[in-house]
Image (cartoon, grey):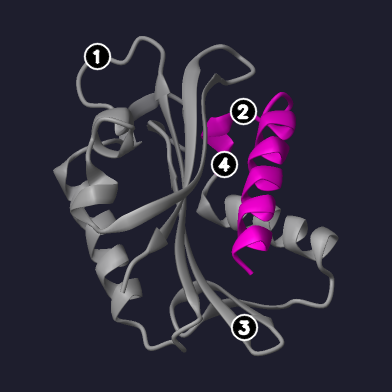
Amino acid sequence: MRLLLIAAFEDAINQIRTEEAQTPLDRWNESVFRFLYCRAIAALEPDVMQLVESDRIDLVLHRGSERAFIEFKFYTHSVRYDPITGERTGMKGFPGLQNCLEFKESVKTLRQRPISPEGLKVVSLFFADPFAAAGKTYEAYYGNDSGINDELKMSRLASIGPFPSHDLQNTCNARLYEVGR
């Protein structure tokens, strides 16, 4: 199952890289990320049962007796707009302590979920920072030098990036972590 999870992750990120040329990252979210991952699983192994949002787990996979629990995180510097004027009114998504605490809590919750000893629990993370980011960045919280995987006792299964977004406005990164018991 581990190899399937890695292959699907890599495929999903490749899909993001292709698709965001026509649909900029500010129109994406965690659900779209999960959809691309599910599509990759279906293409790689169509017989794997996929349960979306099962008991507050983003995605549960069943392959014979094997199980995997997957949480998705998709972080961009999202702008909030006024629905009438279309004018920018602020930020609705950005890196910060609250965001990081929520990430840590989701890992803790996933870790506490009962699963068979051979079952896998993983976090699939995508984050993008503007090239000219002034202030806090997702890279600082979740990047290679952040120490987040050591702090949360997660093993990195795959890492993609940094790579530029198609519009050359963002630096993108993706990580697939296995959550230790």
Q: Which residues are magenta?
A: 1-28
Q: Which residue is mark 1?
A: 134
Q: Give x and y (percent) for residue 6.
A: 61, 53
Q: Quick one: label 2, few (<14), some, or many (20+) residues within 10 Å?
A: some
Disc assigned to residue 106: none
Q: Which residue is mark 3?
A: 66
Q: CA distance from mark 1 to mark 2?
A: 21 Å
Q: Give x and y (percent) for residue 136.
A: 21, 26
> Which amino acid, by three-letter code, is at mark 1?
Ala
Q: Earlier in the sequence, mark 3 or mark 2?
A: 2
Q: Quick one: label 3, few (<14), some, or many (20+) residues within 10 Å?
A: some
Q: CA distance from mark 4 to mark 3?
A: 31 Å
Q: Which residue is mark 4?
A: 28
Q: Are marks 2 and 4 in contact (CB under 8 Å)?
A: no
Q: Is residue 77 visible?
A: yes
Q: Secondary structure at mark 4?
A: loop
Secondary structure, magenta segment, majority class: helix
> Which amino acid, by three-letter code, is at mark 3?
Glu
Within the magenta stretch, is there residue 11?
yes
Q: Give x and y (percent) for residue 157.
A: 49, 51
Q: Quick one: label 4, few (<14), some, or many (20+) residues within 10 Å?
A: some
Q: Reply above or below: 136 against 115.
A: above
Residue at 70 percent of width and 36 percent of height: 14
Q: Secondary structure at mark 3?
A: strand
Q: Earlier in the sequence, mark 4 or mark 1?
A: 4
Residue at 28 percent of width and 27 percent of height: 137
Q: Secondary structure at mark 1?
A: loop
